[in-house]
Amino acid sequence: MNRDETYWFPAKTLGYGWGLPRRWQGWVVLAVYLGAIAIIAWRFPPSVHPAAFGLCILVATTLLVAVCALKGEPPRWRWTR
């Protein structure tokens, strides 16, 4: 298995960042992230607890980006295909 096949998240073909997961581990990470967003929205509704909601979303998103940076293909700007 070459290094390209071990990335959980491929780099986007246009722009900067990562695309949809390439491996099952990436799909698990994405499912956990979406589940965390649902739980945060249920536990801290934005209309009732806007600061807590925002902080929790920030923490969850930071963790997702950290996993993408560690286990994803190195991103770079891509202007053309």
Image (spheres, rainbow, N blue to C red):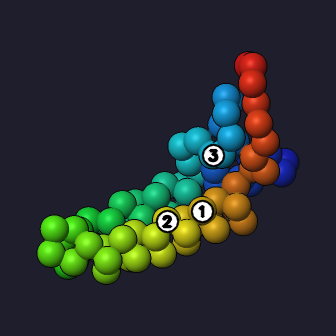
Looking at the image, which residue is at 46% across and 58% down?
30
Looking at the image, which residue is at 36% across and 60% down?
34
The amino acid marked with disc number 1 is Val
Q: Which residue is mark 3?
A: 18
Q: Are marks 1 and 2 in contact (CB under 8 Å)?
A: yes
Quadrant of residue 62 within the rendered picture: bottom right
Q: Is residue 75 left or right of residue 17?
A: right
Closer to viewer: mark 3 or mark 2: 2
Task: Find numbered disc 1 in the image and state the secondary structure of the residue it sits on.
Answer: helix
Residue 12 is tagged as: none
From mark 3 to mark 2, how far is it between C-alphas?
14 Å
Q: State the residue in front, 55 or 40.
A: 55
The amino acid marked with disc number 3 is Trp
Q: State the residue in front, 63 or 21.
A: 63
Question: What percent of the width, then of the height, locates residue 44?
Answer: 22, 77
Q: Which residue is mark 2?
A: 61
> Which circle's residue, 1 or 3, is located before the other in the chain?
3
The amino acid marked with disc number 2 is Thr
Q: State the residue in front, 37 or 47.
A: 47
Q: Is residue 6 visible?
A: yes
Q: State the residue in front, 22 or 73.
A: 73
> Which circle's residue, 3 or 2, is located before the other in the chain?
3
Task: Find numbered disc 2 in the image and state the secondary structure of the residue it sits on.
Answer: helix
Quadrant of residue 31 within the rendered picture: bottom left
Q: Which residue is mark 1?
A: 65
From mark 1 to mark 3, how far is it between C-alphas?
9 Å
Looking at the image, which residue is at 75% across and 46% down?
75
Question: What percent of the width, then of the height, locates residue 69?
Answer: 70, 61
Q: Is residue 29 left or right of residue 66?
A: left
